[in-house]
Amino acid sequence: MFTKQSQVRRVTRSKADAMAAYDRSSRWYNLTEGIWEKGLRNVALRTLSVRAGERVLEIGCGPGQDLLALAGSVSQTGRVYGIDLSSGMARLAHSGAAKEGLAHRVDLVQGDAEFLPFKSRTLDAVLMSFTLELFDTPGIPRVLSNIREVLCPEGRLCVASLSKAGRSSWMRNLYERGHDSFPSLLDCRPIFVEASVAEAGFQILNVTRKSLFGLPVEIVLGSNPDSGRKEPIKAISS
């Protein structure tokens, strides 16, 4: 249980409705949210600092703009996996990777991060950019627990998310009121990012605080302290 959970707004839109909405918006996502979030996504990519040969998963990969950067970082010896609730997003991500000649390094799957299709301790790093805050409050610890399970010992997680930490601000208050009034349109909301990652059992390595049009953002890097042996990764189809 998160100690500050009661302060976080709930997400009332169903996953079926979310899937349909992102399917509809997938073709122009890069021209809206993709542009607004690009700078902060790049900060998250630099913070995760993926290396050649690593096996990396992006949760909520959207149309795949960050998957291409990850595929370049892992080089020929690594592998990148993308999962998104929207089949439209997953198809666009696969098409983009193929267009850039990187499809051989990238596997895409439509799915839900509350049910990750990977074996335990098979991934070196996980990236979530503006995705964790889309899950309803009780789902956040389940998602983070699943990530810990699939990460190798000392594997890394980087989360970029709208943040509720720190002092209240008029912009955040306005956004939260918008979320209350239009929960299907503003389906994400600020959450306690560092606290959520820490309470899931990750060791916090770095926290960067930024702003997105006046909305506080946390970019949190955590390490999985679990010990154990790496296992072969479970293949997922593109």
Image (cartoon, grey):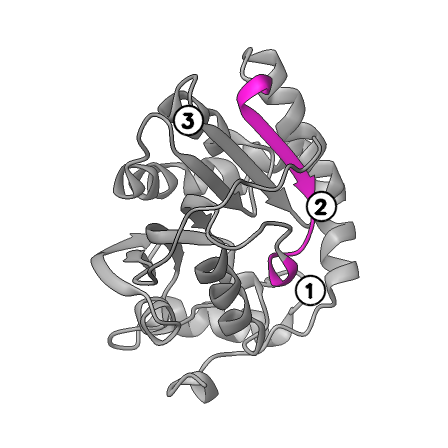
**Where is 226 relative to 122, above or below?**
below
Q: Which residue is mark 2?
A: 86
Q: Type of residue at label 2?
A: Ser
Residue 47 pos. (x, y %) = 26, 43
Q: Can you say which quadrant of the picture contains the N terminus? A: bottom left
Q: Is residue 149 left or right of residue 16?
A: left
The numbered mark, 1 or 2, whose residue comes first in the sequence reads 2
Q: Can you say which quadrant of the picture contains the C terminus? A: top right
Labels 1, 3: front one: 3
**Where is 99 relative to 199, above or below?**
above
Give, as a single range, the part of the protein colored magenta.
103-115
Q: Which residue is mark 1?
A: 184
User: Whole-Å distance between the Cαs marked 1 and 3?
Assistant: 31 Å
Residue 113, magenta (yes or no) = yes
Residue visible at 34% across and 50% down in the picture? 155
Q: Is residue 139 left or right of residue 225?
A: right
Query: SS of the residue at dot 1?
Result: loop
Q: Which residue is mark 3?
A: 69
Q: Is residue 141 left or right of residue 107?
A: left
User: Whole-Å distance between the Cαs marked 1 and 2?
Assistant: 16 Å
Q: Are marks 1 and 3 in contact (CB under 8 Å)?
A: no
Q: Specify the quadrant of the image occupied by residue 182.
A: bottom right
Local packing at callout 1 (Cα closer than 10 Å; few below 14, some 14-19, many 20+) is some
Query: SS of the residue at dot 3?
Result: helix
Q: Any mark on residue 32, and which?
A: none
Residue visible at 52% across and 78% down in the picture? 9
Viewer-proximal residue among 7 and 177: 7
Residue 220, magenta (yes or no) = no
Labels 1, 2: front one: 2
Residue visible at 62% across and 63% down in the picture? 114
